[in-house]
Image (tube, grey):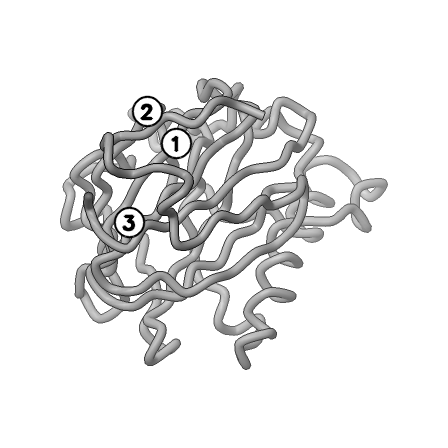
Amino acid sequence: MSNFIATSPARTLKNASQDHYIPAEKPFSTIVKKGQILRIEDSYGQQAIDTLFYNADDFSERYSNQDTMRVQGAAYISTGTKIMSSESRVMLTMTADSCGRHDTSAGACSCESNTVRFGHGTKYLHACRDNFVIEVSKHGMSKRDVAPNINFFMNVPIEPTGKMTIVDGISAPGDYVEMKAEMDVLLVISNCPQINNPCNGFDPTPIRVLVWDDEA
């Protein structure tokens, strides 16, 4: 696994309040409290990390890709981005980004989209939408609650015509994003299992999630 890179001398593995290893292809969720710092690490590089956020006190309020792009006036997410909710409130603020390319337009892979894109032989391969449904069900939600998501570390150039193509990722082992929670949020991740396009370098790998109690 990659070496740990601290963005603050006072923020170390020893004083992290949460430290999670998420295996390749698996879902994950945890609560991040207001004021805490969340780090999502692409431990081995070129791994798309499909991510959703919900208001931990009211799951009907959740991440909005449209409001996030509208407020930023940008199609991509990076340092300084305010991650917006469906109620037009700030859920988290991105405070650090060592990669610089994160998509929030291409959505999550599903068995249906895999079949359309890659043929009927892929119909029964695991997909991010399955992961999301499995994970949100643990919190009393259903597939109706799976909203359009962020794809951290996924490289999706958008042409002037609006055409989007998933291409090779640019993230290196140990690249990370950090966000400050502006409200209590439920983080839900699908560590993308896709093997039919280059979003994972055709080789899904484990990732890491860390949380600190403050900005120290």
Quickly name the residue at label 3: 37
Look at label 3 and name its amino acid. Answer: Ile
Quickly name the residue at label 1: 176
Residue at point 58%, 44% (across, down) = 21
Q: CB of mark 1 within 8 Å of CB of mark 2?
A: yes
Q: In the image, which disc is placed on residue 98?
A: 2
- Most foreground residue, 5 or 144: 5
How far from the left and from the top, in percent, is residue 163?
41, 30
Residue at point 45%, 21% (across, down) = 171
Q: CB of mark 3 within 8 Å of CB of mark 1?
A: no
- Please name which of the two marks, 3 or 2, marks the residue nearer to the observer: 3
What SS does tag 3 mark? strand
Residue at point 34%, 36% (across, down) = 177
Name above or below for residue 167 compared with residue 50. Answer: above
How far from the left and from the top, in percent, is residue 158?
36, 28
Density class for disc 1 (Cα within 10 Å; few <14, some 14-19, many ≥20) is many
Q: CB of mark 3 within 8 Å of CB of mark 2?
A: no
Look at label 2 and name its amino acid. Answer: Ser
> Is 98 displayed left or right of 68 in the figure?
right
- Most foreground residue, 181 or 66: 181
How far is disc 3 from disc 1 in space, using C-alphas? 12 Å
Q: Which quadrant, please, contains the N terminus?
A: top right
Density class for disc 2 (Cα within 10 Å; few <14, some 14-19, many ≥20) is some
